[in-house]
Amino acid sequence: MSFEVPASVRPLRDAVYAFMTERVEPNEDALHRGDEDLLRSLQREAKAEGLWALGHPEELGGGGLPFLDYVYVNEIQGRSEYGQIVLGTYTLQDSLMLHKYAAASQRERFLLPLVQGDISPSFAMTEPGISSSDPTQLQTTATLENGEWVIRGRKWFTTGAARAAYTTVMCRTEENASPYLSFSMILVPTDTPGYTIVRDTPVLGLHDGHYEVLYDEVRVPEENLLGPRGHGFVIAQERLGPGRIFHCMRWLGQAQRAFDLMCDRLHQREAFGGPLADKQLLQQHVFDSYTEIQAARLLTLHAAHKIDSGDQARVEIAAIKVAGARMLHNVIDRAIQVHGAEGLTEDTPLDRMYRHARAGRVYDGPDEVHISRTGQRILKEYAKGGRWTF
């Protein structure tokens, strides 16, 4: 495989880069303040310029980019936390999931409006007091009563629930099945009686809309089941595999932005008789950041290549989830150090980037689980008398 950006993708990638650096990044402060008019204006501009929903299937009204091509574009839109919202790909994991599993009535109600950006989704899996690194412990239940699912339980970190049209809820539906065939996914409109938002849970001081939600006798039609009964974990795995690739490519965009800020700062500031760029200890920051970004990038592209060829790439995906999150934290940390006290303030984007980077080591599975599973899978090959081929 080639690690160069394909020639066919470069013009689109360049257009996304210009959109991000000229219109999204300069407006981040207003977007942080919740300027909905600005957000909608940027979305309209993205649609008018052919940059909207690039990774969504064409038959759903998206750009129809092949998986690997979209990976290269996703790297650029990841420069800002608003990139995927402004460019209409925030909903990609949900639209692919609905496209494959939703009943006809649910496709009409949710899927097409989702791709057009007319509604937002949310996803509910984790629960207060439950170690979600072992999801078989989840306590929320759904029982079928007179043609309706009745959901009882409590979820949290349901991102965007307050503005979402519906939540995909992971809940226990089977009593006598194996643990990984005991859970199902059910679509719950957020205006359903009994669906109650308890609070917005701050994450490292940021009120980013990660909500705790109570499900108090929530009733939805039987047809709101997503896919077969008991196949919640199967669907979740299909969702999370490509999703982790998307995370890692966006992290690379964030890391490259932090790297740019760091290198520019080293040339702009002087101390002890010369520019910071001449100081060997700070040149070490540049070297370490370059090698970590490049290593994580090649690991991610390799994992994406394997997925594109039909492989589940579980070892590769788990490895990049850990390596990518560590890389992102390290690069942003060095950029803050180079900026000194200013790097700790809101005068640069680094303070928010740093907090988001720390969260990356927890969501979509904590580092420890990915490390353990990767070690187990590799060692299993040797237990069978084989070897691991790099």
Image: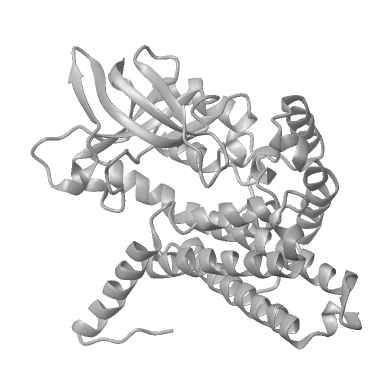
| Residue 367 in view of the camera | yes
On screen, residue 279 above or below 359: below
**Is 79 left, or right, of 220 in this rendering?**
right
Instruction: Please state, as top left, top right, bottom left or bottom right, where the C terminus lies in the image.
Output: bottom left
State the residue at coordinates (52%, 32%).
160
- Quick one: which residue is furthest to the front in this view? 272
Please name whichever residue, 334 or 225, is drawn nearer the observer in this view of the structure: 334
State the residue at coordinates (34%, 15%).
194
User: Residue 389: which quarter of the image?
Assistant: bottom left
Instruction: Please state, as top left, top right, bottom left or bottom right, where the N terminus lies in the image.
Output: bottom right
Q: How is the image coloured?
A: one colour
On screen, residue 384 above or below 208: below
Please name whichever residue, 261 or 229, is drawn nearer the observer in this view of the structure: 261
- Quick one: which residue is furthest to the left in this view? 176
State the residue at coordinates (73%, 31%).
39
**Is 291 left, or right, of 174 in this rendering?**
right
Please name whichever residue, 15 or 139, is drawn nearer the observer in this view of the structure: 139
Q: Position of residue 52 (x, y in %)?
A: 71, 39
Q: Position of residue 256 (x, y in %)?
A: 71, 65
State the residue at coordinates (76%, 53%).
348
| Residue 2 in view of the camera | no
Q: Position of residue 357 (x, y in %)?
A: 56, 57
